Amino acid sequence: MKLTFAALALFVATPALAVEKTEVLETYADIAEAGYGDSVATAKALQQAVDALIASPSEDTLAAAREAWLAARVPYQQTEAYRFGNAIVDAWEGKVNAWPLDEGLIDYVEGQGASDENAYAVLNVIANESFTLSGETVDAAEITPALLQDTLQEADEIEANVATGYHAVEFLLWGQDLNGTEAGAGTRPWTDYATGDACTGGNCDRRAEYLKVATDLLVSDLEWMAAQWGEGGEARETLMADPDAGIQAMLTGMGSLSYGELAGERIRLGLMLNDPEEEHDCFSDNTHNSHYYDGLGIRNVYTGSYTRVDGTEVSGPSLSELVAATDPEADAAVSKALDETMVALSALKARAESGLAYDQMLARGNAEGEALIMDVVDHLVGQTRAIEKAVAVLGADIEIEGSDSLDNPSAVFQ
């Protein structure tokens, strides 16, 4: 099978018309504003689908809510290249995209229990209107935004206690994926939101309340971040205040997502452990898309171009042009590496959608799956090395986040 990636044709930018750093940063901020704006729009569509599910639970309304969640992930994942280099994004990100999570904090689960690491791994707030947290009695009779974001989110300073964001909503729509490294996503029945005797799983009214509150919080959190990148927003103002620091933020976000976060923590680690619990979108089996759009987001930052969900394009003076103005060969190397990574991600995505689920790729002894995953890892590492050369060309000083799975594999099993 021959795979192609849109706009794969490699280009070498010429230094004929050098761009200013401020122009590049304006494009970067405009893409952020558009990406987070699209994330808001698709989250609002999810919100409407969730409201319809709660109002009239059925197989159809649950399926529609799941489709809306999947669609909402497409623009959001492309914004992740704005983490790491932008403190305002990194401090906020855990509200909307924290993972992995001990889902038993939220609702019923099978095969899990409290552990020495997390006493609240099976708290099940949906089933309990009152519970003890850090020695204090918590009144949870009403499921409120404050309960989720102030009391439960990272309760007891444990990162796996995730109560809000995309993955909390994902769990409530799909339920646990109990298939291990076999094919299949979570199979939560629509009757988990039914009323009266049709209710399964118990506490259907509270489950609906939790889903509603978590989805509403997701929308409001995304609206806040979109505003930060608009005219006069804190993120945009901070970026433009110091052009050199702004360019370093762009490069840091690209490099750290490419290397330590995506190649390492999200991809290589799961393969090393042969553990589907390390999947980024583990309940929905959407991880192949999650990885793909993360990769595309990195490329968007470098090329200064983003295609919105309505098909329109936001583009302008790019980091690619800035690098090419000093060293066309370095720019060509980064562009080539980014395009080749997208080919590898396209191959993984296509295979996951044609019968070999990402879960199955992670299974010990699955040679085809391991080859697909490691091809992505290798290309992500390779593109990071090219990015590092661009950093040197621009005279920037950045620190790219690492991962034990890449830098010290033996530590993973200690």
Image: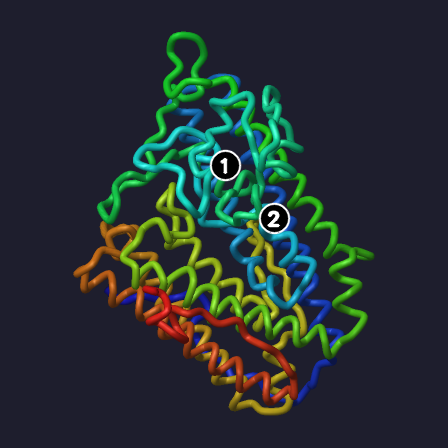
Whether residue 53 appears in this view of the structure is: no
Q: Which residue is mark 1?
A: 169
Q: Nearer the viewer, residue 13 or 350?
A: 350
From the viewer's perspective, tell me whether residue 170 is left or right of residue 349: right
- Mark 2 is surrounded, within 10 Å at the Cα level, by few (under 14), some (14 to 19) or many (20 or more) other residues, namely many
Question: Of marks 1 and 2, which one's residue comes earlier in the chain?
Answer: 2
For image coordinates 54% across by 49% down, the residue present is 97
Q: Amino acid at mark 2?
A: Asp
Rendered image: mark on residue 394: none
> Residue most toward the front?
135
Q: Amino acid at mark 1?
A: Val
Q: Position of residue 308 (x, y in %)?
A: 58, 54
Relative to 247, is 271 above or below? above
Q: Which residue is mark 2?
A: 38
Q: Position of residue 198 (x, y in %)?
A: 38, 11
Q: How many marks?
A: 2
| Quadrant of the snapshot with the C terminus | bottom left
For image coordinates 50% across by 39% down, the residue present is 168
Q: Position of residue 252 (x, y in %)?
A: 59, 73
Q: Position of residue 310 (x, y in %)?
A: 57, 48
Whether residue 1 appears in this view of the structure is: yes
Relative to 134, is 318 above or below? below
Q: Nearer the viewer, residue 88 or 160?
A: 160
Q: Quadrant of residue 322?
A: bottom right
